[in-house]
Image: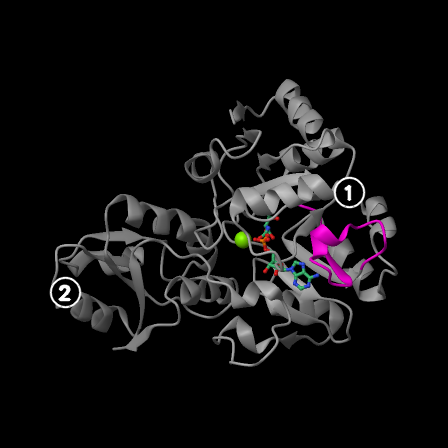
Amino acid sequence: MLTKLLKNTPEDIEIAGDILKNGGLCAIPTETVYGLAANAFDENAVKNIFTAKGRAQDNPLIVHISDIEQLKPLVLEIPEMVLKLADKFWPGPLTMIMKKSDLIPNAVTCGMDTVAVRMPNNETALKIIESAGVPLAAPSANISGGVSPVSAKHCIDDLNGRIDAILDGGDCLVGVESTVLLCTQNPPKLLRPGFVTPDDIKAITKDIIVDDAVLNPLKEGVKPSSPGMKYKHYSPTANVIMITGSSKHYINYVNQQNGDDVFALCFDEDTKNLTKPFVTYGSINDDKAQAANLFNALRILDEKGAKTVFAHSPDVNGVGLAVLNRLLRAAAFRIIEV
Ligand code: TXA
Ligand code: MG
């Protein structure tokens, strides 16, 4: 299939809207990562997302809306906390899970009785949803198991020839996927950390439960709160190993490693005394920069032919929780304390 490369112009946004309206697939920019969108009401189009990505059949999709009025028909009821959180964080990188209505096809939720909804904070995304005239189901626009795309180039690298179009809306500013919050219970439960932090949510809901799987491997025999938790994620070709410890200890450890294809994935401040090749992912004190740079850095490491990557572990505060959650998965929970 020929994949159209669309620009961020009114004409091309209309073309994207038409493609989606007619059952096609289009990669679209959002503030978090690029999404692979389809009409959420079109069961066949939604099924094609799973094929294009190679996505497991039991991993449900997020539905994207451009207006709060679009939410009502998608769910059985809107809990009070959702209204308050939407008021504060929408449009923005917060996905909320509610009981689904019959309007949402099973293909979107993989048979679950809940649906995940968010309103992206990206002008182009909102215009594409408006142009399509329907809510859009969209997972991240990468091949399943790989690193989420934060530029149109990443979408082309992964999905060229497999989908109808890719609309280039520039680089994603947040860089990690949305916070996912289960809102069918009170207090709500954090299933995936993102730019909206547990403290941000607690300021509105007073309390929040953080799922065990956010920072720990899923225990054997335990049913995950979110099907996505059980799948391999953010996995570059290189073997990533996470290193916890001070800059000094980290640098010493990495410098002692042998092999031509050893790389450091480190903070800006770590680079001065490193004798191994490195890719940085932001300043040690800047959680937001780390989030914005991480996925691009992982893809660059693969392009450079890195075989073993020693990643300097981020601080867990603020958006750092989301960065740590993604890196732990990229490292398949291999951690070395130095
Ligand atoms: O920022 C984002 O959220 C991006 C952009 C494109 O919006 N989308 C994204 O989608 O990251 P995806 O499919 O890569 O991740 C969605 C996650 C998965 O882990 C999935 O299991 C979970 O949300 N999820 C979706 N619906 C759910 C539901 N009803 N119950 C529990 N988890 C759900
Ligand atoms: Mg994904």
Whether residue 39 is visible here, answered yes or no, is: no
The residue that appears at 25% across and 60% down in the rendered structure is 270
The residue that appears at 48% across and 66% down in the rendered structure is 325
Q: How is the image coloured?
A: one colour
Residue 164: x percent and y percent? 58, 29
The part of the image, by quadrant, that contains residue 120 is top right
Q: Nearer the viewer, residue 126 or 49?
A: 49
- Tell me the quadrant of the picture where the C terminus can be found: bottom left
State whether residue 266 is above or below residue 167. below
Give the amino acid at mark 2.
Answer: Asn
Q: Which residues are magenta?
A: 100-121
State whether residue 23 is above or below residue 206. above
State whether residue 42 is above or below residue 282. above
Residue 255: mark in rendering: 2
The part of the image, by quadrant, that contains residue 77 is bottom right
Label 1: state its secondary structure.
loop
